[in-house]
Image (cartoon, helix red, strand yellow):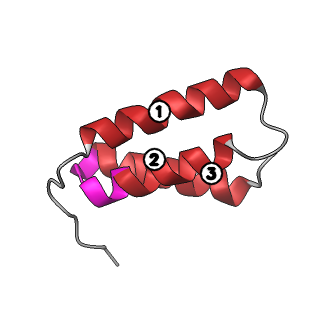
Amino acid sequence: MPNTELWAGALSLMVRYAETGCAQSGRQAARLLDRIADMPGIDQETGVLLERASLRLADQTKGGGHVCALQA
């Protein structure tokens, strides 16, 4: 099972995308979800869910869109 930092990072990026529409955060979340899905120890159902979420984020952020500024 991936460490909690990877899961927290993916969730943080997904929340940032949902709150701000930041396409960059959405694309980064999608890449991180793909990485987690490919890790050893991920059960099949979780892997499928991660892949679905990644594909949805990738589709929603195609073509750029607005890029958020990092907040301090």
Q: Say whether residue 57 is left or right of residue 42.
A: left
Q: Residue at x 30, y 60 (%)?
A: 24
> Label 2's element?
helix
Tags 3 and 1 touching, CB below 8 Å? no
Mark 3 or mark 1, which has the lower sequence index? 3
Q: Residue at x 62, y 51 (%)?
A: 35
**Looking at numbered disc 3 in the image, what kind of residue is underneath it?**
Arg
Residue 4 position, x and y percent, is: 72, 54
In this rendering, the answer to whether 67 lies above or below 64 is below
Residue 50 position, x and y percent, is: 57, 34
**Residue to which mark 3 is pinned:** 35
The image quadrant that residue 22 belongs to is: bottom left
Mark 3 or mark 2, which has the lower sequence index? 2
> Label 1's element?
helix
**Looking at numbered disc 1 in the image, what kind of residue is underneath it?**
Ala
Q: Residue at x 58, y 26 (%)?
A: 49
Q: Toward the viewer: 36 or 17?
A: 36
> Label 3's element?
helix
Picture disc at residue 30: 2
Tags 2 and 1 touching, CB below 8 Å? yes
Q: Say whether residue 12 is left or right of residue 49.
A: left
The residue furthest bottom is 72
**Looking at numbered disc 2 in the image, what kind of residue is underneath it?**
Ala
Residue 22 is one of the magenta-drawn residues: yes
**Residue to which mark 1 is pinned:** 53
The range drawn in magenta is: 19-26
CA separation in Å, label 2 and label 1? 7 Å
Residue 65 position, x and y percent, is: 15, 53
CA separation in Å, label 3 and label 2? 9 Å
Q: Toward the viewer: 39 or 67?
A: 39
